[in-house]
Amino acid sequence: MKIYIGADYRGLECKTKLRDYLLGVGHEVIDDGAYEYNEGDDFNDPATKVAKDVREDYGSMGILICDSAHGVTMQANRFKGIRDAHCDNQESAIMARDHDHANVLCLSAHFMDENKMQAIANVFLETSFTNLERRVRRINRLDEREDYD
């Protein structure tokens, strides 16, 4: 699976470890930054990059990491076609994929360790969307707003 991954300075170390793990289990991983620790960077930049890459590369997935996961979630979800889910356990990751066809996973560098991130990422990437009419209808309604770029 092709995965775009990004983080701000607070998620940099976690992103690097998760990227290496995902490469090790056979995924194609594109690192959208940050590439070095810079306390002045903003979560907006990697979240925007991952969201645009996932949107343009149909069938790919994204993973974003920041301190709380809130900022990257809010930023990525501003893009049409992106369904970003902040998941803090495996069950929420399964539901995000199965019910909501999420295509970007957000994780918290502050509240999770490496093993928890790996476990959540695994189930997120392995879970398929259950294509029910009501779910498709709801997902399509997410992009009804007119103020996206």
Image: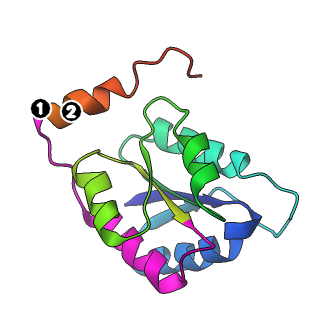
Viewer can see residue 26? no
Mark linked to residue 59: none
Is residue 56 or residue 96 the one in the foreground? 96
Q: CA distance from mark 2 to mark 1?
A: 5 Å
- The numbered mark at residue 136 is 2
Residue 40's spot in the image, x, y percent?
A: 88, 58
Up the image or down, 131 lies above or below 69; here it is: above
- The percent position of residue 47, horizontal first and vertical second, equals 62, 48
Tell me the SS state at disc 2: helix
Question: In the rendered structure, does residue 118 fall within the stretch colored magenta?
Answer: yes
Q: Is residue 47 above or below residue 82?
A: below
Which residue reaches farthest top?
A: 146
Q: Which corner quadrant of the image does residue 35 belong to?
A: bottom right
- The span shown in magenta is 108-133
Q: Are marks 2 and 1 in contact (CB under 8 Å)?
A: yes
Q: Measuring 47% from the left and 58% from the top, which residue is drawn there? A: 3
Instruction: Report the residue marked by disc 1.
Output: 133
